[in-house]
Amino acid sequence: MTAHSLSWTDVALSALLVLLVLAISSYQRLGLERSLLIGAARTFIQLALVGYVLAWVFHARTWYWTLLCLAVMAAVAVHTATGRQEQRLPGLATIMGISIAGGSFVVLAFVIRGIIRPERWYEPQYVVPLAGMILGNGMTAAVLGVERLAAEVRQRRLQIEAALSLGATGRQAAAPAVRAAARAAVLPTVNAMMIVGVVQLPGMMTGQILGGASPAQAVRYQILVMYMIAGAATLTSVSATLLAQRALFTNAHQLRDA
């Protein structure tokens, strides 16, 4: 069975759903019209451009273009994660860079070289889509972890300062806050694993089935995706919270303003 090919006319027809949301927002005075129009326009432009770029990269099939794609994706993820933080920690961009790029690429390398094993390690058909999923979820986990850590430290400030006054190091005093932050960052991924396939059919599995793959093959890939997302979310969130914890204290183990 072959997949149904969509034309740009079909895509234009799907925009009627956006018009429906606009009408509902206007009627109910939700105030979403401007944001929705901008979001719909950006969705169309960004995805159309990405589609053409990826088609060219897939055709080129060279290692340097694949690595360039990964570098751009990682840079955008780090920039976005840094910009989302209200708490401007010292070295925040470095923290996000190490945690997001480091954790994500470790997982990506394991999946590509250890599981999928394409003929060429830089095969963009596999590397680019998987990297996008890993980086996106890793970025979200890192952002949640650092945000939650800052909130936990504010709430536990008296407790942390009491521990410091008794001789604890910054790492020891902030350990409960770090654990709570890392757990909160990974919990959405764990919850998604609980309901996958029962409440929700994930995007990759749905896409493969629509593309003509057998449900059994689509299920295997989706299990792989869920496991790699869990690994990436854990690595990035734990590393981000540990690095952010160090930034919250001075070299003399004094708590900075959080």
Image (cartoon, rainbow, N blue to C red):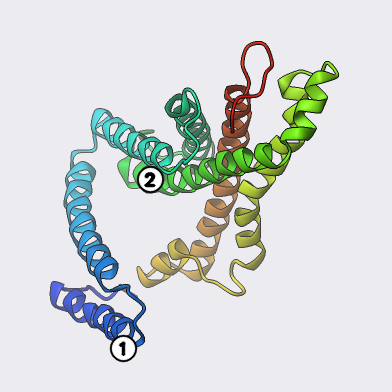
- The residues tagged by marks 1 and 2 sit, at their Cα atoms, a distance apart of 44 Å
Q: Residue furthest top?
A: 252
Residue 218 position in % (x across, y down): 49, 63
Residue 167 position in % (x across, y down): 83, 15
- Give the residue displayed 27% in from the left and 76% down from the top: 4
Residue 107 position in % (x across, y down): 53, 37
Dividing the image into 4 quarters, which one contains the C terminus?
top right
Quadrant of res 241: top right
- Give the labeled residue for mark 2: 126
The image shows residue 176, relative to residue 5, as above or below, that is above
Q: Please tell me whether mark 1 sits on a helix, a strand or a loop.
A: helix
Disc 1 + disc 2, Cβ < 8 Å: no
* Along the viewing direction, whichever of 13 and 113 lies nearer the viewer: 13
- Give the residue displayed 24% in from the left and 38% down from the top: 61
Quadrant of res 165: top right
Left-right relation of 180 to 35: right
Q: Amino acid at mark 1?
A: Tyr
The image shows residue 95, relative to residue 250, as above or below, that is below
- Give the labeled residue for mark 1: 27
- Give the residue displayed 44% in from the left and 47% down from the top: 136
Dividing the image into 4 quarters, which one contains the N terminus?
bottom left
Number of labels in the image equals 2
Residue 154 position in % (x across, y down): 66, 39
The image shows residue 40, relative to residue 118, as above or below, that is below
* Along the viewing direction, whichever of 258 and 197 lies nearer the viewer: 258
Left-right relation of 57 to 195: left
* Along the viewing direction, whichever of 88 and 231 lies nearer the viewer: 88
